Image: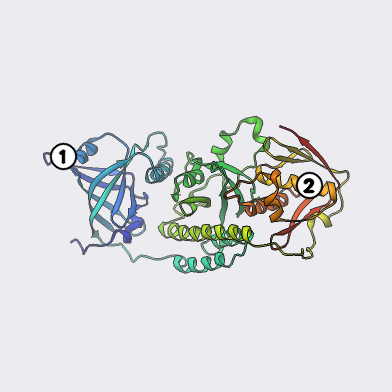
């Protein structure tokens, strides 16, 4: 016997695609039809989206009679729920469509149907009622820590960050330690709004600092382009970001590309945009080799955390613009590059003006704004012996060509610092005070500038 109505919010676990739903429709003359449907996507407390994949009897019925019934099943304990819904419209582009397209690709790959499933549109339905029609086989078990408690602790970490470097550390530490995301990376958007670059990561053999991906590529690029979280709980080739990156780069340019970190075959992926004031600043990405690793509560919590991080990132950048640097640099701690035995011969540094790419002893290091920053530091050091610098002077340096709005210099310095460590280079940047840092050089340097 049907029980009392329940809220759609309470059964979001049934809308993951782990168990196909059943959809019942009627033709204009009242002839019923039932079919399985790949996706019932939760939109909000009153709406769902269904995958429109085939021109079929169901499609014709919906257009003739928009009232439908849906049966969905809880993947953990088997409780069944019946939804009464009304068709409103079909979306063939936009955030909902792209999110469903990504999830469908994961489901299709998992079922061996990657070449068959193709999303034509996202059909939007208003949900008029939700009824439980079969009780759980056993009481639900809530595994793991409370996401709300984890979010509270994570938010405190982020709030205490005083600069961009501290914010990056706090955000990734929170993802790993509070939410158990063993593999995570943070990517920020460049000033042109065309690409994302990796600032730091957790859980990989290398940080991947400096690795880039275009907006719209893979789970990460699509989350940034559409400003929407994308969560895939099955392995999929179509949204493998590493494959997308390699296919999009010509062979002769691979020497100037830093490989993205990441799992070779992630079973679950979740990309969450850092958005503030209608602008996407970057993406927090977590993944796991385990399928069905991330649920709605994970997504909700990480979206909230990423939103706070975006606001904090904007505040750190604004503070860096407004606050003066410390008058004097603090003594720096020991530097791995400077304390190591000097290598034989000078360090040969080559700079290409066309894209500000920098090579150390013929090995690619970095490009773009970070490359321009390093080249200025090395030129000043070679000319005058300087080792201490400030963010303010870099921001005012015309040769770095920072954009007038959203220069994100602090993030680029974090990236450069981590990239030098990754490369185990005979150069290091060390923070010596607020808005100040030191260039540590372990070997004599030879500079060569290659003009455009």
Q: Nearer the viewer, residue 358 or 418?
A: 358
Q: Is residue 234 above or below residue 238?
A: below
Q: Position of residue 243 (x, y in %)?
A: 55, 38
- The answer to whether residue 232 of the structure is visible from this angle is no
Q: Nearer the viewer, mark 1 or mark 2?
A: 2
At x 51%, y 40%, the residue is 217
- Spatial separation of the CA atoms under disc 1 and disc 2: 74 Å
For residue 145, side relative to residue 452 (left or right): left
Q: Quadrant of the N terminus?
A: bottom left
Q: Is residue 240 above or below residue 150?
A: above
Q: Residue 171 falls in which quadrant of the image?
A: bottom right
Q: Nearer the viewer, residue 415 or 37?
A: 415
Q: Position of residue 169 (x, y in %)?
A: 61, 60
Q: How is the image coloured?
A: rainbow
Q: Which mark is residue 41?
A: none
The residue wearing badge 2 is 378
Q: Position of residue 266 (x, y in %)?
A: 52, 47
For residue 355, side relative to residue 225 (left or right): right
At x 87%, y 51%, the residue is 342
Residue lying at the far left of the rendered structure: 29
Q: Position of residue 110 (x, y in %)?
A: 43, 43
Q: Is residue 331 above or below residue 390?
A: below
Disc with the residue nearer the chain's start (1 vs 2): 1
At x 52%, y 69%, the residue is 153
Kind of element beneath mark 1: loop
Number of residues whose C-alpha sits closer than 10 Å to that of mark 1, classed few (under 14), some (14–19) or many (20 or more): some
Number of residues whose C-alpha sits closer than 10 Å to that of mark 2, classed few (under 14), some (14–19) or many (20 or more): many
The residue wearing badge 1 is 27
Q: Quadrant of the C terminus?
A: top right
- The answer to whether residue 441 of the structure is visible from this angle is yes
For residue 328, side relative to residue 285 (left or right): right
Kind of element beneath mark 2: helix
């Amino acid at each position: 016997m049907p029980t009392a109505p329940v809220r759609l919010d309470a059964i979001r676990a049934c809308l993951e695609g782990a168990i196909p739903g059943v959809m019942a429709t009627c033709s204009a003359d009242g002839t019923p039809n039932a079919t399985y449907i790949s996706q019932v996507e939760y939109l909000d407390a009153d709406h769902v989206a269904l995958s429109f994949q085939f021109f079929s009897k169901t499609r014709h019925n919906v257009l003739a009679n928009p009232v439908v019934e849906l049966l969905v099943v809880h993947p953990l304990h088997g409780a069944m729920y019946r939804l009464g819904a009304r068709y409103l419209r079909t979306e063939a582009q936009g955030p909902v469509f792209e999110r469903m397209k990504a999830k469908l690709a994961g489901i299709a790959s998992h079922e061996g149907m990657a070449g068959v499933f193709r999303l034509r549109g996202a059909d939007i339905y208003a949900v008029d009622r939700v009824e439980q029609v079969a009780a759980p086989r056993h009481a639900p078990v809530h595994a793991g820590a409370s996401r709300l408690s984890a979010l509270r602790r994570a938010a405190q970490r982020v709030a205490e960050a005083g600069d961009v470097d501290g914010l990056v550390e706090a955000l990734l530490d929170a993802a790993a330690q509070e939410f158990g995301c063993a593999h995570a990376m943070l990517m920020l958007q460049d000033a042109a709004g065309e690409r994302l670059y990796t600032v730091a990561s957790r859980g990989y053999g290398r940080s991947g600092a400096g690795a880039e991906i275009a907006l719209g590529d893979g789970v990460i690029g699509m989350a940034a382009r559409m400003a929407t979280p994308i969560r895939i709980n099955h392995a999929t080739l179509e949204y493998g970001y590493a494959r997308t990156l390699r296919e999009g780069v010509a062979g002769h340019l691979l020497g100037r590309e830093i490989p993205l970190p990441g799992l070779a075959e992630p079973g679950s992926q979740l990309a969450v945009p850092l958005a503030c004031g209608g602008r996407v600043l970057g993406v927090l990405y977590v993944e796991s080799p385990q399928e069905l690793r991330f649920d709605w509560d994970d997504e909700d919590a990480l979206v909230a955390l990423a939103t706070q991080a975006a606001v904090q990132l904007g505040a750190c950048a604004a503070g860096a613009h407004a606050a003066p640097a410390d008058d004097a640099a603090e003594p720096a701690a020991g530097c791995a590059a400077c304390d190591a035995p000097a290598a034989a011969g000078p360090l040969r540094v080559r700079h290409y003006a066309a894209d500000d790419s920098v090579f150390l002893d013929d090995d690619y290091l970095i490009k773009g704004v970070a490359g321009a920053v390093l080249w200025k530091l090395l030129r000043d050091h070679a000319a005058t012996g300087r080792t201490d610098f400030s963010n303010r002077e870099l921001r005012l340096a015309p040769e770095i060509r920072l954009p007038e709005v959203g220069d994100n210099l602090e993030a680029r310095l974090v990236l450069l610092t981590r990239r030098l460590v990754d490369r185990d280079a005979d150069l290091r940047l060390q923070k010596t005070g607020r808005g100040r840092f030191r260039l540590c050089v372990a070997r004599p340097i030879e500079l060569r500038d290659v003009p455009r």
